[in-house]
Amino acid sequence: IKHADSLLHSESDVWKEMQQHVSKLRSYLNSSSNNNNKQYQNVLIMETVLPRKFGLWQTKLDIIPVSKATHDDAPLYFKSSLMQLQNESTATATTNLKKISPHQALYNIMPRKYDGGYFFVSWQDGGFVFMIVQDQFPKDFGVDTIRSIMGEEKHNDNDAHEMFRRDYQTWLEQNEGKNVNKA
């Protein structure tokens, strides 16, 4: 894989590989091997690319397992939060928010040569991309929005994350070579 500063600027193979990984993760979440199956049942994908005007170019990619309720509420919460950011940042009638259909690659929505910042969020049946024009954009916007959906305060539960990672890794090893992309 060649170096890329964002998903938008990556080769199409990177997008396909990420989608395959997410499909495997969804298969795991819906399997009987998932010890956390009440807590985690689906996945949200988020990428935050801060514009160069913030100083150093910075890209953050999150693939976060979430409950069914959080997954189902994500479209409404993200649209509302992004529209609020847009209203705070611009008085123009143009929209920086674009809807994405299921399995649509980011580079099919935005021009490949776009060199500004953006926030991208995707769930199983769609998503949004938001072009960042603000002077300030919260680097943890996506994670903070998920926390607000879940009604949680900021915290780190490293033990739970580590247990999930170990269980998922064991499942991947046990299912290596099997067709597990059924989610």
Image (cartoon, rainbow, N blue to C red):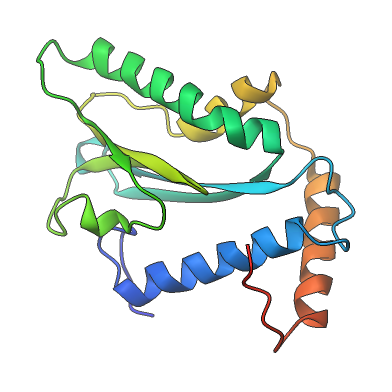
- State the image coordinates of residue 97 (x, y, percent, origin top left): 26, 31
- Which residue is at 40% across, 24% downward? 79
- State the image coordinates of residue 124 (x, y, percent, origin top left): 52, 49
Q: Is residue 68 or residue 25 the one in the foreground? A: 68
52 over 61 or under it: above or below = above
- State the image coordinates of residue 177 (x, y, percent, origin top left): 70, 89
Q: Name the quarter where the N terminus is drawn.
A: bottom left
Residue 121 visible in the picture: no
- State the image coordinates of residue 13 (x, y, percent, origin top left): 36, 77
With 146 as the anchor, is 55 left or right in this view? left
With 34 as the anchor, is 178 left or right in this view? left
Q: On the image, which quarter does residue 152 sit in?
A: top right
Q: On the image, which quarter does residue 158 sit in?
A: top right
- Which residue is at 49% across, 34% downward? 142
152 over 99 or under it: above or below = above
How many numbered dots are placed on residues in this image?
0
Q: Is residue 65 or residue 135 the one in the foreground? A: 65
Q: Is residue 128 or residue 8 the one in the foreground? A: 128
With 134 as the anchor, is 39 left or right in this view? right
- Which residue is at 83% across, 64% downward? 166
